[in-house]
Image (cartoon, rainbow, N blue to C red):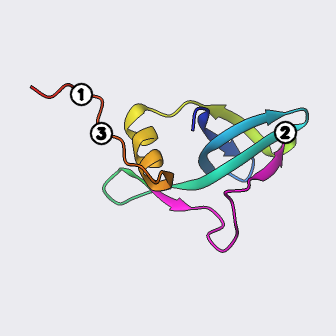
Amino acid sequence: MSNIQIVRLTSGEELIAEVTTQADGCLLKDIAILIPTQANQLGLAPFMGYGVTSEGIFFKDAHIMFAINPIDPLRQQYQEMFSKVILPPTSIIS
């Protein structure tokens, strides 16, 4: 999972996924939707949980407003959600 980005769609939905840029759009794999919570935080939920998104969903450029790199805590939460191997925090243990 090297190219993890937040993608905002023209519909207003914000997704976090592994993004592969193609000629006329982007292929998103392992997609989660960002959901604001009551505690002024973000939660992640599977996008299209009733479909197989691990194979990817193609979005045309016309439906994408922008893509941006996530902050590290959000990236780690995403990786924990979709990874079979849980990575330790990057901080040094003293």
Per the rendering, the mark at residue 8 is none
In the rendered structure, which amino acid carries the disc numbered 3? Pro
The C terminus: image quadrant: top left
- Which is closer to the viewer, label 3 or label 2? 3
Q: Nearer the viewer, residue 94 or 22?
A: 94
Other residues around mark 2 within 10 Å, as few (<14) / some (14–19) / many (≥20): some
Q: Residue at x 60, y 36 (%)?
A: 5
The residue sitting at the front extreme is: 85
Give the residue at mark 2. 25
Q: CA distance from mark 3 to mark 2?
A: 34 Å
Residue at the image position 66 percent from the left and 74 percent from the top: 50
Instruction: Name the side, left or right, on which 38 lies relative to 35.
Output: left
CB-based contact (under 8 Å), mark 3 and mark 1: no
- C-alpha distance separating marks 3 and 1: 9 Å
Residue type at the position of mark 1: Ser
Q: Secondary structure at mark 2?
A: strand
Image x and y of residue 13, in percent? 64, 53
The magenta span reads 44-61
Magenta span has 89? no
What is the three-letter code of the residue carrying label 2? Gly
According to the picture, the residue beneath numbered tag 1 turns out to be 91
Which residue matches tag 3?
Answer: 88
